[in-house]
Image (tube, rainbow, N blue to C red):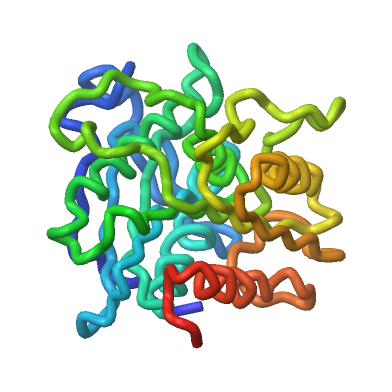
């Protein structure tokens, strides 16, 4: 992984004023803390998007909104954020790094604030597609763990916008055109294996790429159930279950074959015409 993080061309607040349901003044200041080899964003109340573009005008028109994981408590900012941006840029993809609200707002559903922020980000990016050199019909979302849960919610098909449409940006669609779910969490009830209603795909849900490890504590049955739901709807999906690797590896190399998922994902995106064939 790169020694230094890539530099965004711009960073924008998502909302004109406080995010939905947030006080005018955040209860706690946001913090970035590095320990154990991971930088974590804590106490995010003012969500933003940071836009990164491939150098030298080498963008291919595809964009991906990146949703780091962290249990909806923190955001794994480098492991599942800036390091992923670097990989997307190498594919010629415009990367949009979403800093969504955390920790969980305890007076509302676990996923709600994050999904509101992702939906707003997708609408905002789509509304500015021409300005940023991207195609409004090739804007995907990639999420890890809780970020994968967030992307699955926004991709569900039947899920409405979770906040009242406001400005002109909100007239643009708030669902991704494709999704990449890497060890997504809480797509099923781990006891009954029934899909959570907020993530259950419906007609119109986007194609998906899924990667999971067999020994992940957040069961790979989440990804399996999601894949089967898409298959029953006739929606393209590709699923990789690796024998080992656990949870929370991002793109970092390891002794496990699961670290090869980015190569498989790149092949899937190329096969769908989202990026050129290597």
Which x, y percent locates residue 229?
A: 70, 39
Question: In the picture provided, is 63 more to the left or to the right than 198?
Answer: left
Who's the residue at 28% across and 26% down the image?
19
The residue closer to the viewer here, 114 or 277, is: 277
Residue 76 visible to the viewer: no
Is 131 above or below relative to 102? below
Q: Using the rendered view, name the quadrant where residue 58 is placed.
A: bottom left
Q: Please give left or right for residue 107 compared with residue 257 in the image.
A: left
Q: Residue furthest top?
A: 107
The residue depicted at 38 percent of the width and 25 percent of the height is 161
Q: Residue drawn 49% across and 51% down?
A: 68
The image position of residue 153, as x and y in percent, is 53, 34
Report the residue at 51% width, 33% height from top. Answer: 157
Is 214 on the left or on the right of 259, as rendered? Answer: right
Q: Is residue 77 visible?
A: yes
Name the one closer to the observer, 190 or 200: 200
Q: In the image, is residue 209 above or below residue 256?
A: above
Q: Tell me residue 99's x, y (percent).
A: 37, 45
Instruction: Please tell me whether residue 6 is drawn above or below residue 49 in the rendered image.
Output: below
Q: Residue furthest front?
A: 234
Q: Position of residue 56 (x, y in %)?
A: 21, 85
Q: Nearer the viewer, residue 239 or 252?
A: 239
């Amino acid at each position: 992984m790169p020694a230094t993080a890539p530099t965004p061309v711009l960073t924008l607040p998502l909302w004109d004023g406080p995010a939905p349901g947030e006080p005018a003044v955040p209860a706690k200041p946001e913090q970035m803390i590095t320990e154990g080899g991971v930088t974590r964003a804590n106490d995010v109340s003012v969500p933003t998007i940071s836009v990164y573009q491939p150098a030298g005008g080498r963008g291919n028109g595809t964009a991906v909104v990146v949703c780091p994981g962290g249990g909806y408590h923190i955001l794994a900012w480098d492991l599942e954020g800036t390091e992923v941006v670097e990989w997307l840029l190498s594919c010629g993809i415009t990367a949009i790094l979403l800093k969504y609200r955390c920790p969980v707002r305890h007076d509302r559903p676990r996923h709600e604030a994050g999904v509101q922020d992702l939906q707003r980000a997708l609408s905002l990016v789509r509304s500015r597609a021409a300005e940023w050199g991207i195609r409004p019909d090739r804007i995907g979302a990639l999420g890890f763990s809780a970020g994968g849960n967030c992307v699955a919610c926004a991709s569900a098909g039947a899920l409405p916008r979770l906040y009242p449409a406001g400005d002109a940006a909100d007239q643009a669609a708030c669902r991704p055109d494709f999704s990449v779910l890497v060890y997504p969490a809480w797509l099923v009830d781990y006891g009954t294996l029934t899909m959570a209603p907020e993530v259950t795909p419906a007609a119109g849900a986007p194609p998906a790429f899924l990667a999971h490890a067999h020994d992940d504590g957040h069961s790979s049955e989440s990804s399996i159930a999601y894949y089967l739901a898409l298959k029953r709807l006739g929606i393209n999906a590709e699923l990789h279950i690796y024998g080992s690797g656990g949870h929370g590896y991002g793109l970092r190399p390891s002794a496990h074959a699961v670290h090869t998922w980015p190569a498989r994902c790149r092949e899937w995106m190329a096969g769908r015409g989202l990026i050129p064939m290597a």
